[in-house]
C-alpha cells in the first residue's frame, strides 16, 4: 500500500520544492554576487558548530544559496578543527571557507600559505561594516584574510538582581563604586563575589579585564607579546586592584573554597535558589549557564553590567570571536565570504539568539532580548578598545595549561592576595620560560 | 612487557624444544625441524609484543633524549630537568605515599572483610556490595568522590559527616560573620569587638552590627529602639541594616531588628567586670555596676564562624582524600582474592589448632596468616604495580588549583606531554622513570610465578 503513496507524496513534495525555488528568486539586498550568478557553482563551509549553532549557520548558507544559486554545504569539524583542516589542506581538498575559533589559527594557517587573501569586494565590505580593530584582527602583516562572523564579550559582570535590591546596591559606574558596592552587599549578610578559582582561565579573564583598564590597549598588546615584563608597574597595579576584589572576606567560601569552585559551580552559587554570593564575573556565555543550571531568568533575576572602568578608562572589552577565511579562491568562496561580512547574514543568526556580532551595521533590534542586545552593544561600543583574550594568544604552556603558568600562579595569588610582588615575579619567570622555548 | 618473555618460555614446550635442540646436536634433524615450527608458532606473539610493547619502550627511551619538538638531541638534559623540577619531586613524594599507604590499607581491609564474611549469614550480599565499586569506571568513581569531598557540608557527604559529629560537641555561634560597619566606633579585638570610647553608668550605648542576613536573625527578635536611659549603663545591639538599603547608617530606623542573645561584657583595665546578654529587642543593661569608665566588648563567641568541615580538596588533604576513593574501589578486589585464598586453606589445620586449645586469635595469627601469606603477597604486589600508575582518580578528583599538590608521576607525565606544554621529550623521560619504578615489582612477580611453577 504505502509504497505508491509515498512515491506520489515524494513527487508532490519535490514539485513544491522546485516551485519554491523558482518563487524565491527575489534578489536579496546583501551579499556580493548578483542573484543567480553562481548557478551551478558549489561551495563548502567548515566550522566547529553543531546542533543549534549548526542550524543557525545553515540558515545563513541557505539564504546565500537562495540569492546566488550556488550550492552550499556545511561540514562540522567537531572541536578538533585545526587537525581536520590541516589534514584536508595537506590532502589537497580544503573546504572553500573555514570558520576558525582562535586568532592564533588564522596566523598559523596564513603562515602555512593555506589561506587566500580577501578579495577587494570582501575588503570593501569589511571596511563598510567593521571597526578598524576587527579588520586588523583579521589581517596578518597588513593583508586582510578574515571576516569576523561571531564575537564574544568577556567583559560582563553578572549579578543577582534580587540580592542587589535587598542590599540596596546599585549597578556601579566605575571600579571605585564597584568596590563600594561589595561592602554594601557584605553589610546585607551576603558574600559579594563568587570566583571560580578551580578553573584557572576565569582568573586570567579577571586579570585581563583589569589590566586592559589599568594599562590601556597598547600596553595590553605589549604584554601579550611579552614585550614588557610581568614585573612592570602596570601588572603590579593590576594585581593590587584584583586583591581588593579577591580578598578572602569578599569571596564565596573564602580563598580555599573559591579554589575548589569550578566555573559552573561559581555561577550556580550566585543564581541558585539559595544564593551564596551576589556577583560572578565571566563572559556572555554565563547567560547560557544560568539558563541551563539554575531557575533564575536572565533579564529578571540575573543581569549584567559592563566590567567597570578604572580611573576613567574608556569603554573596553576583552573578548573573542570566530573568523571566516577563504581556503580556495573560487568566485563562489569570495562571494560567500563577502556575504558573511554583510549585516544581513549576521542578523539572521542574531535573531535566533546565542550570538553577538562584531558587525557595526547589524540592527541591534533583531537581538531576541535586552540582555543580548546590551552585550552586543557593549562589544560594538568598545570600538578599537576591543582586545582578544590575552591568555588565548600566549604560548599554551603559560596561558592555557591547568596547574601551570599563569593559571596556577593566579590561583596561588587568589590563595594569598598579599603576595603581589612574588606573584609578578613568578609570572615573569614562567612567561620568560614559555616565550623563550 | 618485555620481561614477560622468560615467563612465556617457562611454559614448558618451547623451553624443552629449544633446550633439546641446543643440547643434543646428534639428534639434529627432528630437533631443528621442531624448533623452526615452534618459532613459527611464536612469531605472531613475538610480532605483537615487539610492535605493541618493545618498540614503544625503546622509542620512548630514544625520544626522551630529544627536546620538546623532537628536532635536536639534548642527551640527558630532560633527566636533569626532571629532577630539578619541583613538580617531579612532588609527584615522586606523592607516589611514595601512595605506594606505602594504599596497598597496605586495601589489603588490610580486604583481609578483614574476607575473614568476617566467612562468618556472617548474608556473606554473598555483603561481598557483592563491597565488590560493586569495581564495576564502576575510574572516571565515574572520580566524579562521585569529587562530590563526596565538596567543601559545602550541604553538598559533600564527607563534610556533612564531619560537621554533624563536630556540632554534637561544639555548638555554633548565633551570629557568624556579623560585625560593625567599617567606620563604626567598634574595633576588632581577638575575633570579637570592643568600643573605642568608654562609658559610665547612666550612659546609653547603641551598637550597630551588619554583615548578617536579616532572615537568619532568630525568630524571637523584636524591632530595636533607643535605650530609655536611667541610672544604669544601658544599650542596644541591633542589626543596622534595612532591606533595600534604606535607613540611616548608625541610627536605629523603624523595623531594624534587635539582636537577641548577644553576650556583652563590661571591661575595665583589660578585665571583664560584668557580663550580660541582650533581650529580644537587642537591649541590655548592666544593673549593679560601680561608678567608673568601662569599655563594652562583644566577645568572639558571638561571631564564631560555623565549623564547615575539612578542606578535603585543599592542598594538605588532597592525596589522602584520593587514596580514600582508591580504597573504596579496590577493597572489594582484595577481599575476593583473599576470600578465595581462605577457602583454599584446609579446615583440618584450623580444627587441629582449635582442638589443641588455641584461641580464635591464635588460630588466625599462627595458622591462617602463614597459610594465607602467598595470596596476601600477590594482592599486595598487584596493588603496588597498580598504584604506581594511578592517574585517572587524581586527574578527576583534584581541582585544577591543587593538581600540582596532588600530582603523581603518571599524571605529571601526561600534563607535561599533553596538558598544553606538549613537551614530549620531558614526558618521555618521566615515563622512563615510571617504567624503572615498576620494574622491580614486575620482576618480583615473575620470579614468584616461576618459583611456583617449579
Image: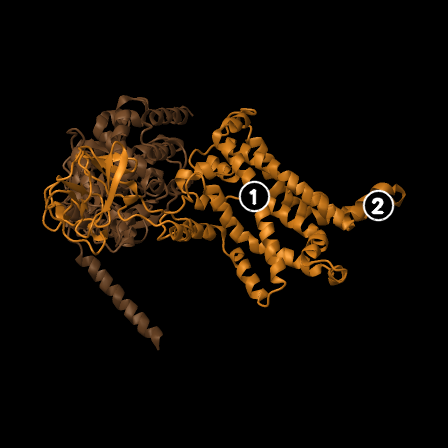
Chain colours: A brown, B orange
For the residue pair A118 and B332, the one nearer the viewer reads as: B332
Does residue B388 appear in the picture of this structure? no
Instruction: Give left or right: position of B307 versus A26.
Output: right
Q: Quadrant of residue B73?
A: top right
CA–CA distance in space, label 1 to label 2: 48 Å
Position of residue B169 measured from the top left corner of the image (x, y, whole percent): 40, 51
Label 2 crowd bin: few (<14), some (14–19), many (20+), radius 10 Å: some
Task: Please state if B342 lies on the left or on the right of A326 as rendered.
Answer: right
Give the secondary structure at mark 1. Answer: helix
User: Sequence order check: which comes first, mark 1 or mark 2?
Assistant: 2
Q: Give the residue pinned by disc 2.
A: B20
Q: Quadrant of the N terminus of chain B?
A: top right
Instruction: Report which residue position mark 1 lands on.
Output: B101
Left/right placement of residue A286 relative to residue B127 reads left
Q: Chain of mark 2?
A: B
* Residue A389, quarter of the rendered image: top left
User: Would residue B23 be seen by someone viewing this image from the given angle?
Assistant: yes
In percent of width and height, residue A192 lies at 24, 42
Residue in the picture at 51% in, 39% down: B408
Q: Residue at x 55, y 31 (%)?
A: B64
Residue A358 image position (x, y, % from top left): 20, 40
Q: Which of B135/A30 is in front?
A: B135
Residue with the most extreme bottom position:
A1
User: What chain is tagged by disc 1?
Assistant: B
- Label 2 element class: helix
Tell me the quarter of the picture where residue A292 sits.
bottom left
In this rendered view, identify the residue nearer to me: B304 or A227: B304
Q: Residues within 10 Å of mark 1 (few under 14, many from 20)?
A: some
Residue A68's place in the image compared with B117, above or below, is above
Number of numbered discs overlaid on the protein picture: 2
Q: Is residue A336 above or below residue B343?
A: above
Amino acid at each position: 500500500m504505502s509504497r505508491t503513496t509515498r512515491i506520489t507524496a515524494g513527487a508532490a513534495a519535490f514539485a513544491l520544492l522546485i516551485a519554491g525555488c523558482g518563487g524565491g528568486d527575489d534578489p536579496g539586498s546583501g551579499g556580493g554576487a548578483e542573484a543567480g550568478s553562481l548557478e551551478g557553482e558549489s561551495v563548502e563551509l567548515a566550522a566547529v558548530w553543531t546542533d543549534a549553532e549548526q542550524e543557525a549557520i545553515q540558515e545563513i548558507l541557505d539564504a546565500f544559496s537562495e540569492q546566488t544559486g550556488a550550492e552550499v554545504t556545511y561540514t562540522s569539524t567537531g572541536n578538533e578543527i585545526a587537525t581536520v583542516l590541516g589534514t584536508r589542506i595537506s590532502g589537497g581538498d580544503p573546504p572553500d571557507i573555514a570558520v576558525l575559533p582562535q586568532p592564533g589559527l588564522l596566523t598559523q594557517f596564513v603562515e602555512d600559505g593555506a589561506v587566500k587573501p580577501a578579495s577587494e569586494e570582501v575588503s570593501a565590505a569589511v571596511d563598510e561594516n567593521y571597526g578598524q580593530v576587527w579588520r586588523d584582527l583579521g589581517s596578518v602583516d597588513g593583508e586582510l584574510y578574515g571576516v569576523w562572523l561571531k564575537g564574544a564579550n568577556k567583559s560582563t559582570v553578572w549579578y543577582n538582581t534580587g540580592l542587589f535590591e535587598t542590599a540596596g546596591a546599585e549597578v556601579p559606574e566605575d571600579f571605585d563604586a564597584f568596590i563600594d558596592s561589595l561592602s554594601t552587599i557584605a553589610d546585607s549578610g551576603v558574600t559579594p563575589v563568587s570566583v571560580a578559582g578551580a578553573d584557572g582561565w576565569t582568573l586570567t579573564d579577571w586579570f585581563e579585564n583589569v589590566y586592559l583598564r589599568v594599562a590601556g590597549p597598547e600596553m595590553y598588546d605589549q604584554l601579550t607579546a611579552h614585550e614588557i615584563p610581568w614585573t612592570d608597574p602596570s601588572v603590579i597595579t593590576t594585581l593590587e586592584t584584583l586583591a581588593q576584589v579577591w580578598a578572602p572576606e569578599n569571596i564565596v567560601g573564602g580563598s580555599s573554597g573559591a579554589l575548589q569552585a569550578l566555573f559552573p559551580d561559581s555561577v550556580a552559587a550566585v543564581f541558585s535558589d539559595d544564593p551564596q554570593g551576589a556577583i560572578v564575573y565571566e563572559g556572555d556565555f554565563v547567560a547560557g549557564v544560568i539558563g541551563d543550571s539554575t531557575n533564575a531568568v536572565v533579564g529578571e533575576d540575573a543581569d549584567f553590567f559592563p566590567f567597570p572602568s578604572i580611573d576613567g578608562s574608556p569603554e573596553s572589552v576583552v573578548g573573542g570571536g570566530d573568523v571566516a577565511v577563504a581556503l580556495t579562491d573560487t568566485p563562489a568562496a569570495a562571494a560567500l565570504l563577502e556575504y558573511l561580512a554583510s549585516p544581513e547574514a549576521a542578523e539572521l543568526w542574531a535573531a535566533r539568539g546565542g550570538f553577538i556580532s562584531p558587525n557595526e551595521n547589524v540592527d541591534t533590534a533583531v537581538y531576541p532580548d535586552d540582555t543580548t542586545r546590551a552585550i552586543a552593544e557593549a562589544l560594538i561600543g568598545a570600538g578599537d578598545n576591543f582586545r582578544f583574550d590575552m591568555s588565548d594568544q600566549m604560548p599554551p604552556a603559560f596561558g592555557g595549561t591547568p596547574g601551570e603558568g599563569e593559571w596556577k600562579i593566579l590561583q596561588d595569588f587568589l590563595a594569598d592576595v598579599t603576595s603581589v610582588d612574588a606573584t609578578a615575579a613568578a609570572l615573569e619567570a614562567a612567561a620568560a620560560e614559555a616565550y623563550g622555548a | 612487557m618485555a620481561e614477560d618473555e622468560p615467563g612465556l618460555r617457562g611454559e614448558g614446550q618451547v623451553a624443552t624444544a629449544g633446550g633439546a635442540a641446543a643440547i643434543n646436536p646428534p639428534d639434529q634433524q627432528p630437533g631443528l625441524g621442531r624448533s623452526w615450527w615452534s618459532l613459527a608458532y611464536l612469531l605472531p606473539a613475538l610480532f605483537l609484543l615487539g610492535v605493541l610493547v618493545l618498540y614503544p619502550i625503546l622509542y620512548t627511551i630514544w625520544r626522551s633524549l630529544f627536546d620538546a619538538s623532537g628536532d635536536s638531541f639534548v642527551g640527558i638534559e630532560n633527566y636533569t630537568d626532571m629532577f630539578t623540577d619541583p613538580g617531579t619531586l612532588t609527584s615522586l613524594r606523592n607516589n611514595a605515599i601512595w605506594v606505602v599507604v594504599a596497598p597496605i590499607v586495601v589489603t588490610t581491609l580486604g583481609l578483614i572483610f574476607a575473614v568476617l564474611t566467612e562468618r556472617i549469614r548474608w556473606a554473598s550480599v555483603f561481598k557483592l556490595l563491597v565488590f560493586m565499586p569495581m564495576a564502576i569506571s575510574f572516571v565515574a568513581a572520580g566524579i562521585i568522590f569529587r562530590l563526596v569531598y565538596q567543601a559545602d557540608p550541604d553538598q559533600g557527604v564527607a563534610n556533612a559527616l564531619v560537621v554533624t559529629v563536630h556540632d554534637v560537641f561544639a555548638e555554633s555561634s548565633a551570629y557568624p560573620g556579623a560585625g560593625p560597619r567599617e567606620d563604626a566606633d567598634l574595633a576588632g579585638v581577638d575575633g570579637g569587638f570592643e568600643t573605642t570610647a568608654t562609658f559610665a553608668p547612666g550612659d546609653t550605648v547603641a551598637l550597630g552590627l551588619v554583615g548578617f542576613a536579616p532572615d537568619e536573625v532568630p525568630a524571637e527578635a523584636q524591632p530595636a529602639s533607643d535605650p530609655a536611659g536611667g541610672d544604669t549603663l544601658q544599650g542596644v545591639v541591633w542589626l543596622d541594616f534595612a532591606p533595600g538599603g534604606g535607613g540611616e547608617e548608625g541610627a536605629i530606623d523603624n523595623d531594624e531588628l534587635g539582636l537577641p542573645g548577644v553576650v556583652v561584657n563590661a571591661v575595665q583595665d583589660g578585665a571583664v567586670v560584668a557580663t550580660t546578654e541582650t533581650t529580644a529587642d537587642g537591649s541590655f543593661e548592666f544593673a549593679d555596676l560601680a561608678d567608673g569608665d568601662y569599655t563594652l566588648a562583644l566577645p568572639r563567641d558571638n561571631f564564631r564562624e560555623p565549623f564547615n568541615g575539612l578542606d578535603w580538596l585543599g592542598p594538605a588533604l588532597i592525596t589522602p582524600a584520593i587514596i580514600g576513593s582508591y580504597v573504596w574501589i579496590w577493597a572489594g578486589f582484595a577481599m575476593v582474592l583473599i576470600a578465595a585464598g581462605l577457602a583454599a586453606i584446609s579446615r583440618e589445620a584450623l580444627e587441629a589448632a582449635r582442638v589443641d586449645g588455641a584461641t580464635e586469635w591464635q588460630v588466625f595469627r599462627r595458622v591462617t596468616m602463614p597459610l594465607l601469606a602467598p595470596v596476601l603477597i600477590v594482592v599486595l604486589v598487584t596493588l603496588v604495580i597498580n598504584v604506581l600508575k594511578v592517574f585517572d582518580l587524581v586527574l578527576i578528583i583534584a581541582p585544577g588549583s591543587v593538581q600540582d599538590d596532588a600530582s603523581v608521576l603518571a599524571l605529571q607525565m601526561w600534563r607535561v606531554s599533553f596538558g598544553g606544554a606538549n613537551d614530549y621529550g620531558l614526558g618521555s623521560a618521566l615515563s622512563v622513570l615510571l617504567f624503572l619504578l615498576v620494574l622491580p615489582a614486575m620482576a618480583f612477580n615473575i620470579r614468584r610465578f616461576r618459583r611456583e611453577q617449579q
